[in-house]
Image (spheres, helix red, strand yellow):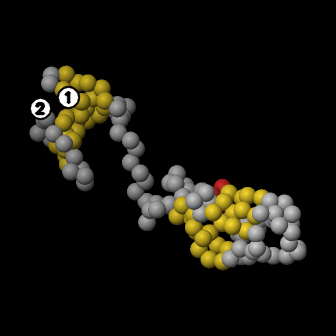
Amino acid sequence: MPPAETMVDGAGNTWWSAGLGDKLRLEGGSVYRIAADGSRDLWIGSAWEPVAAPPPSPPLTNRAPIWPAGETPLEFISGVSRVVRLADFPSDPDGDTLRLSLKSGTFGPGFIYDEPSDELRFDGRELPTGQYGMFTVLADDGRA
């Protein structure tokens, strides 16, 4: 079925030209036709049958999560309970899911960091005005 002119890519897939901009690809013993517009057909018996396109490949390089520039002061009012979702601060340019963890630091009285929900909770107790706890949170996308 394939013409003499073939190519094997780095993943071990065999490709050959089908003419009119189409390419044929041998994947695991099945022959696919990939049209110039990216649509795919599978050769079944003596006819081509449409198949869904494969999911896009992840980027070859991974970019680190991004935090807002500089420190992010969080303000709490004595006597008023508050919950801050820390996962709302970082983002991932590749769209990867981020996992946050407390890297260093401490929280003041009345503060609790709930890691599963990525929430910093203040119970609203009365505290004198001041600075309570300095901490660093790490955002990890699970990719190297």
Q: Are the residues flagged by discs 2 and 1 in contact, CB closer than 8 Å?
A: yes
Measuring 88% from the left and 74% from the top, which residue is drawn there?
128
Task: Please provide percent x and percent y for residue 57.
Answer: 38, 48
Q: What is the quadrant of the C terminus in the image?
A: bottom left
Residue 54: name its quadrant. top left
Instruction: Identify whether 45 is placed above or below 121.
Output: above
> Toward the viewer: 132 or 18?
132
Measuring 63% from the left and 63% from the top, which residue is drawn there?
114
The residue where tag 2 is placed is 1
Going from N to C along the chain, the mark reached first, 2 or 1, is: 2
Position of 15 with respect to 109 (left or right) is: left
Marks 2 and 1, how far apart at CA: 11 Å
> Toward the viewer: 70 or 24?
70
Q: Secondary structure at mark 1?
A: strand
Residue 70: name its quadrant. bottom right
Tell me which amino acid carries mark 1.
Trp
Instruction: Identify whether 141 is placed above or below 109.
Output: above
The residue where tag 1 is placed is 43
Q: Secondary structure at mark 2?
A: loop
Measuring 52% from the left and 54% from the top, which residue is drawn there?
97
Position of 72 with respect to 19 (left or right) is: right
Residue 100: name its quadrant. bottom right
Task: Please provide percent x and percent y for residue 21.
Answer: 29, 32
Task: Please provide percent x and percent y for residue 38.
Answer: 36, 34
Task: Please provide percent x and percent y for residue 141.
Answer: 50, 60
Measuring 68% from the left and 77% from the top, which residue is drawn there?
106
Crowding at label 2, few (<14), some or many (≥20) Cα neighbours within 10 Å?
few
The residue at the far top in this view is 47
